[in-house]
Amino acid sequence: MMTWLMLAAGLVLLVFGADYLVKGAARLAGAFGIPSLVIGLTVVAFGTSAPELAVSVKAAWTGQAELAIANVVGSNIFNVLFILGLAALIMPLVISKQLIRQDVPLMIVASIVVAWMAQDGQLERAEAAVLFVGLISYTVFLFVQGKKQGVTDSGDEEVEAMLKESHPMWQNILLVVGGLALLVLGARWLVGSAVELATAWGVSEAVIGLTIVAAGTSLPEVMTSVIATIKGERDIAVGNVVGSNIFNILCVLGLSGLISPTPLAASAQLATLDIPVMLAVAVLCLPLFFVGATLTRFEGLLFLIGYVGYTWLLIALALQHNYLAQLQQALLYGFVPFVAVYVLITLLLDLKKRVAQPQDLA
C-alpha cells in the first residue's frame, strides 16, 4: 500500500512541478524580452514532457538504465494510441498541413533512428549526443521557420495569458525553483516505487516503465489534449502529442543517455517488440492524418483498442498467462491485418476522390 501511495504522490508532484516550472520559466523569459514565439516553441511545448524527462534522467542516473528507455517508448505509444484515441472519440481531430508534411515525418524519422540505435541492446553516449544535437537543430529550425512566416505569437492563448499576468521577479524564480524541486522529488518517489513494484511482481522494470510509469508521466499531455479538443482547438490537441513524442526521443533519451554512467539498456523485448510498436504507431499516423486531414471517431476507437491490446499483451508476457499464444495470434493475424486493410481502403478511396475531383469541377 505504501508503495502505491508513493507512486501516486510521485505522479502528483510531477504534474504540479511541470505546471509550476512552465509558468515560472515562461514569465521569466517574457520579463527578459524573449518573444512569445520562442517561449511557445521551447518552454511551453517542452513543459508537458518534463515528467518524462525527470523520471528518465533520474532512472538513468541511479542505474535503472532500462527504465529510462521504457518510459520514453511507453509514453510515445500511450500518447498516440490512448490520448489521440480518446480525443478523437470526443470530437474528430483536425490535422494541420504542417503536421502532415513536417512534424509527423520527423516523429517517424526519430523513431526509426532510435529503433536502429537500440538494435544492439543499448544506447551509447555518442548515440545519445546525436539525439540531443537533433533536438537543438529542430528547435532552431522551428524558431527560424516561425520568423520567416511572420508568426507573432505561439498560437496558444495560454502563453499570451501567462505573459500578460504581472508577477514580481521573485515569485517567478520561486515557481521555477519549486517546480524543479517537485519534479526531482516526484521522479525519485516514482522511480523508487516502480522498482519496488517490479521486484514484488517478479517482472522487469521495463514492463512497469512501459505501462504505469509511462501513463503517469503522460498525464500533462492527456489534460492538454483533451481540454484543447473540448474547447475546439483540435489541431493543438494533435500538435501537442506529436511535439511531445519528438521531444521525448530527442531530448529525454538524449539527455538521459548523456548523463547515465552506463549505456542505456534496451532488453530483447524492448528492441524487438516495444520500440517497433512505437515506430509502427508513428508510421500509422501519416496515412490516417493524410486522408481528409482528420482523425475520425472510428479511427480513435481503433487507436484505443490497439492500446488495450498492446497493454494486455505486455501483462500476459510478463506473467506468462496460458492464453498468451492465442492473444498474440489475435493481435498479429486479426487486429493488425484489419487496421492495414482499413488504411489501404481509405487511401484508395481518397485517391479516387482526388482523381475525380477535377472532372467534378469541370
Image (cartoon, rainbow, N blue to C red):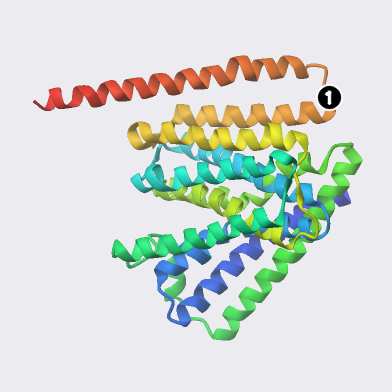
Instruction: Give how far across and how far down residue 264 sits, in percent.
Output: 75, 51
168 and 197: which is toward the camera: 197
Viewer can see residue 51: no
Assess disc 1: are there few (<14), some (14-19) or many (≥20) residues with their C-alpha within 10 Å of its C-alpha: few
Q: How many marks?
A: 1
- Report the residue at 75% width, 34% height from top: 269
Based on the displayed image, in which of its 4 quarters is residue 251 positioned?
A: bottom right
What kind of element bears circle 1?
loop
Q: Quadrant of residue 322?
A: top right
Q: What amino acid is found at the position of numbered circle 1 in the picture?
A: Gln
- Compared to residue 296, the image places residue 194 above or below, namely below
Look at mark 1 in the image and give the residue it sits on. 320
**Taking 25 as reference, is 341 left or right?**
left
Q: Which of 133 and 342 is in front in this view?
A: 133
Is the residue 175 above or below the residue 303 in the image?
below
Would you place residue 60 above or below residue 36 in this image?
A: above
Look at 42% across and 60% down and name the residue there.
142
Which residue is at 22% across, 23% downward? Answer: 355
Foreground pick, 268 / 361: 268
Q: Residue 354: percent from the left, percent from the top?
A: 25, 27
Q: In which quarter of the image is the C terminus?
A: top left
Left/right placement of residue 74 relative to residue 290 reads right
Identity of the residue furthest to the left in this view: 362
**Residue at point 29%, 65% (across, down):** 150
Q: In the rendering, at what x and y percent does residue 217 appear?
A: 67, 51
Res. 288 in view: yes
On the image, the x and y values in percent for residue 295 come to 42, 34
